[in-house]
Amino acid sequence: MAKKNAKELGQKPIGKLLLEQSVPASIGVLIMSLNIMVDTIFVGNWIGPTAIAAINVVLPVSFFIAALGMAIGVGGASIISRALGANNYEKALKTFGNQIGLTLLLCVSLAGLGLIYTDSLIPAFGGKGEIFDFAKTYYQIVLYGVPILGLVMMGNSSIRAEGKPKFAMIAMVIPSVGNLLADYILIYVLDWGMAGAAWATTGSYIVSFLFILWFFSSKNSELKLTWKHFGLEKQIVKEIGSLGFVTLSRQAVVSITYLLLNNILFELGGAPSVTVYAIVARMLMFVLFPILGITQGFLPIAGYNYGANQPQRVRKSINLAIGSASLLALGIFSIIMIFPEQIASVFTQDPTILKETPAAMRWVFAALPIISLQLIGSAYFQAIGKAIPALLLTLSRQGFFFIPLVLVLPNYYGLWGVWISFPLADLISTLVTGWVLKREVQLNLKQA
C-alpha cells in the first residue's frame, strides 16, 4: 500500500496531485508560521518590544544549525523521490539512513560550539545594549533543542518524499499548537519571561520529533531501515551534500542577512528599528505560507516524474505551481498594502514602532506578486538533482542581489535604503530565474 502511494505521483492528474500535496504542506507551513507570529505577539505584549528584537537576534544562529537538518532532508528527499520513481528502493533506504547519521553528527557538533561561544555570537548578530540579556537567556535554552529540530526538519522532508504530505503536515502542526499552549502557561501564568518562551520552543521540538519517530516506526512508512543502512556511503553522502548545500547555502545567506540587518538597523535607529524588522520578518514568514506550501508540494511531483522520465507531467507541474502560487500571492499582497497599520498594532502598542512599521512593511512586500516564479523555479532544479543551477538561483535573491543592495543603499538613503532593497532584489532575481527556467524547459523538457 505504501509503495502504491508513492507510485501515484506518476499516475494521478497533476492538478489533483498538486492539490493533495500542497494543501497539507500549506497548512503545515501556515500553522508553523502562525506559531512563530503568535509567539512574537505573546512576547511583545507580555514581555516587551525589546524581547521581540532579542528573538530576532537568536533566530539566525539557531536556524542555521537547524538548517543543516533541513538541507540534509531536502537533499536526501530529492534522491529518495527519484529512487522511488525508478523503483530503486534500496537506494531510498540507504539515503534515509545516511540522512539520520549526518544530521546527528553535524547538528550536535555545531550546537555545542554555539553554546561555547555564546557571548561572542550574540553581539555579532546584533544583540547589543539592552537586547543582550534577553537574547542570551533565550539563546542558551533554545540551542539545547536545536539538534532535535534538525532531525525534525530532516524527517519532515523524507516523509514528503514518500508522498505522505498529511503526516508531514501533522508533524508541523503538533509542535506549533504545543508551543502556543506552553507560551501561555510559562510566560503568562508562571511569569518565566524569556526563559518561558525559550522552554516552550524547545519543548515543541521534542514533541514533533516523537511524532516523526512514531511515523517511521509504523506501517505508514515504507522506509524501514536496518543497521546496514546507517553506514555512511561516500557517493550518497556526496549527492546529499551537493543537493542539500543549496538549502544550507540559502539558510546561511538568511543568517548573514539577519546579521547585517540587525547591525545596520541598530546603528540607524537603535533597538526600535530592529524590532520593526523582527515584526516584518515574522509577517514575511506568515504570508508566504501558501507559496511555500505549493513549492513543497511541487518538489516530490517534479522529482518523481523526472525520475520516471515523464517530461510532459513535469512541465505541467511547473506551470500549475507557478500560476496558482502567483494568484494567491496577489491576494495576500492586496491585504498587506491596505492594512499595514492594523497588522503592526497586533504585535505592540509602542508608538515609535507603530509609526515606522507600516511603511517598512509596504516596501518589503512590494514585489510579493512575482516571487512565486523565483521560489518555484529555483526549487525545480533541486527537485531534479541539478545542484549548480539550484544553488545559484537560490542564492541570487538574497546573496547576489539583496546583500550588496543593503550594504550600499542605506549609506545614501538611511532606513528607506534598507527597506527598498527587498523589492529590488526580488525583482532582479525573479527576472534571472524566469530566463534560466524557460531555457531549461525548452532544452530538456521537450513535448513528446
Image (cartoon, helix red, strand yellow):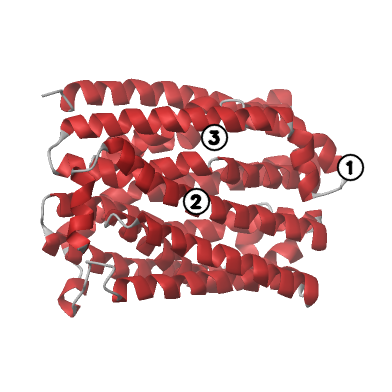
Left or right side of 109 for 53: right
Mark in the foreground, 3 or 1: 1
Residue 326 visible in the picture? yes
Residue shown at the point (42%, 37%) measured from the top left: 395
Mark in the foreground, 2 or 1: 2
The relative height of residue 5 versus residue 368 in the rendered view (above or below) is below
Q: Residues within 10 Å of mark 3 (few under 14, many from 20)?
A: many
Disc marking residue 403: 3
Q: What is the distance, in whole Å, between disc 3 and disc 1 at their CAs?
A: 30 Å
The relative height of residue 413 versus residue 348 in the rendered view (above or below) is above
Q: What is the distance, in whole Å, between disc 2 and disc 3 at their CAs?
A: 31 Å
Q: Amino acid at mark 1?
A: Pro
**Residue 57's spot in the image, x, y percent?**
65, 55
Mark 2 or 1, nearer chain start: 2
Disc marking residue 314: none
Residue shown at the point (16%, 49%) measured from the top left: 85
**Residue 422's spot in the image, x, y percent?**
59, 30
Q: Amino acid at mark 3?
A: Ile
Q: Amino acid at mark 2?
A: Ile
- Which residue is labeled 1 in the image? 351
